[in-house]
Amino acid sequence: MSTKEYYTPKVVLAVGAHADDVDITCGGTLARWASEGADVYYLILTDSSCGSDDESISREQLTALREQEQRDAAALLGAKHVFFGHHTDGMLEVTQDVKRDVARIIRTVKPDTVVTMDPTVIYEADFGMINHTDHRAAGMATIDAFYPLARDRLSLPELLRDEGLAPHKTLHLLLTNFSEQNYYVDVSSTFERKIDAIMLHSSQFDNRAQMQDMLGERAAAWGAKVGARYAEGFMRIDSRF
Ligand SMILES: [Zn+2]
């Protein structure tokens, strides 16, 4: 049971590697927050250009298609805008360039809450899943941008000098993680809409019932921990520094 109290952020930045990452990992929470008045922004760091076995589609076409799917899904969940980093899918690394890209958006939208994927997850044996290298890189770069790079005046000085982006301190970091959580958000009211949003990624998914089963089982297990029908689980860090 979490000892951390629920709150509605004022401004949220959710960072993923690929179109669909954010919707799958925390779409119910973002939809709830948006419905409660939060300004929700997405940052997708890669160009999502590898997620297809269709030989008739080029990487450029796939990027355009997946970015539009992501905009539509984010809009359905109530998000204000989706930023794209356009790093090459499958090749994302934890570099100064990627960290700067995240810090730039943090300094632009000034969130009180950043959500991203827990980079300490390399595999989930029980779930039969290896965590994608881009997910780990996105999570690590985002943590580094959250603290200290977006916060410190003397870090990435070019953001202030060349782009006028002043330092910004974000209060809450929520990491999505299948196996270890200290915080659960009741998403009973938005779970169906989350599934609807995921299915808007129609280049990736075509079986709604299967998606509902897979995510519903986990959301119900997390919900049981907090007396809700459905919940999403996070590692939540309330930054004191
Ligand atoms: Zn992904």
Image (cartoon, rainbow, N blue to C red):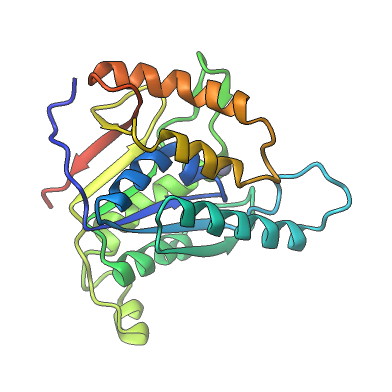
Spot occupied by residue 164 in the image (x, y as percentages of width and height): 30, 84
**Which quarter of the figure has residue 70?**
bottom right
**198, 61: nearer the viewer:** 198
Spot occupied by residue 22 in the image (x, y as percentages of width and height): 46, 45
Taking the image as drawn, is residue 47 in sight?
Answer: no
Spot occupied by residue 231 in the image (x, y as percentages of width and height): 33, 28
**149, 46: nearer the viewer:** 46
Taking the image as drawn, is residue 51 in sight?
Answer: yes
Q: Is residue 28 above or below residue 152?
A: above
Q: Is residue 66 above or below residue 218?
A: below
**Which quarter of the figure has residue 232?**
top left
Point 56% across, 24% down: residue: 129
Point 24% across, 37% down: residue: 236
**Which quarter of the figure has residue 39?**
bottom left
Question: On the picture, is 81 further left or further right than 149?
Answer: right
Q: Quadrant of ligand 1?
A: top right
Point 34% across, 77% down: residue: 159
Residue most toward the top? Answer: 126
**138, 72: nearer the viewer:** 72
Residue most toward the right? Answer: 56
Figure quadrant of the N terminus:
top left
Number of numbered markers: 0
Point 29% across, 55% down: residue: 146
Q: Is residue 96 above or below residue 33?
A: below
Spot occupied by residue 4 in the image (x, y as percentages of width and height): 14, 33
